Amino acid sequence: MRIYVDFDDCICETARAFTGIVERMFGITVPYEKVRFFNLKDSFGLTDREYEQLMIEGHRPEVLWSFEETPGASKVLNELIDMGHEVDVITGRPFSSYEDSRKWLDEHGLNRIKLYCLDKYDRNKTFVKSEYNLSLDDYYRMKFDYAIEDSPLAFRFFEHMPELKVMIFDRPWNRDCEITNCNYMHCPDWEFIKSKI
Ligand SMILES: [Mg+2]
C-alpha cells in the first residue's frame, strides 16, 4: 500500500507551536482547543501584516526544528514501513523550507520517508523545479491507497482517487467536518490509524 501523510498537525504539533508564537509576538492568547479554523489568520484574529510576520517567524529553521512530534507518529510510520508499506509525506509547506523539514524528519527517525512539497493552499508565487517540489501534474500522476490529513481544505487533492481511504487526523478545526464519503473517517491518534491500515 502507498500512504500519503501530511506533515503539519499530523506528524508534528504545528498549531500548538503557533499558539505560543502568536502569544509571544502579538500578545494574543488563543488556547489550542479554541483553534477552530485551519486558517490561522482567522483563528487568531490577525491582520494581514501580522499574519505575514507570523508566517516568516513560523518558517525560521530554529522554529521549524523545534516542533514537537505528534505522539506515536514516528513509531507507527516506521512500523508501517517495516510491514512493507510505502510512506510519502506530502506537505503544503513552501519548498524554501524543504531542507529544514527534511532535517526534522531525519532527526525524528523518519529518514526512510520521502518528503514532497505541494502547493496545497495557493501560497507559492514562484515554482522551483525539483524532484521533491510537485507541480499539480506531478502530483496527479501519484496514486495512493491511504491518506492521513488534518485539513479539510486539502481534501480536494483526493478527488481523483475514488478508492482512497482518507483518515482525518483529529484536530479542533476538523471536528465539525461532516463526512459524506464512506471512505473518509475521523482518527483520534496514530495507534488507531495503524489498526485501520
Ligand atoms: Mg496539516
Image (spheres, helix red, strand yellow):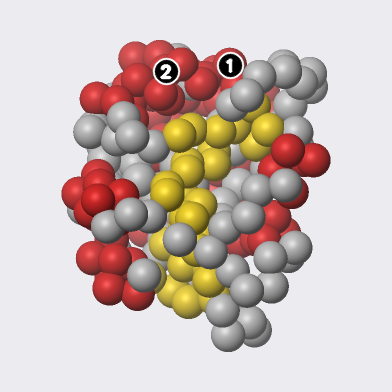
Q: CA distance from mark 2 to mark 1?
A: 9 Å
Q: Residue furthest front?
A: 84
Residue at 55 percent of width and 33 percent of height: 116
| Cβ atoms at labels 2 and 1 below 8 Å apart | no
27 on left or right of 136: left
Q: Nearer the viewer, residue 10 or 133?
A: 133
- Closer to the camera, 53 or 150? 150
Instruction: Say which element carries label 2.
Output: helix
Q: Which residue position is annotated with label 1?
A: 96
Please tell me whether residue 121 is drawn above or below residue 190 in the rendered image.
above
Residue 66 at what x, y percent from top left? 28, 25
Q: State yes or no: Cβ of the residue under disc 2 lies below 8 Å from any atom of ligand 1.
A: no
- At label 1, the amino acid type is Ser
Q: Camera-side residue: 2 or 9?
A: 2
Depicted 32 relative to depicted 190: above or below: above
Question: Label 2 sits on what residue type?
Answer: Asp
Of the 4 image quadrants, the one containing the N terminus is: bottom left
Q: Position of residue 175 (x, y in %)?
A: 47, 71
Q: Residue at x 48, y 77 (%)?
A: 185
Q: Which mark is residue 100?
A: 2
Determine the residue positioned at 47% across, 67% down: 167
Instruction: Look at the image and tell me in which quarter the C terminus lies.
Output: bottom left
Up-down: is 52 above or below 32?
above
**Local secondary structure at mark 1:** helix
Instruction: Tell me the quarter of the picture where residue 60 sits.
Output: top left
Residue 31 x/y as whole percent: 35, 50
**Residue 16 in view of the camera:** no
Residue 54, can we see it? Answer: yes
Q: Position of residue 97 (x, y in %)?
A: 52, 19
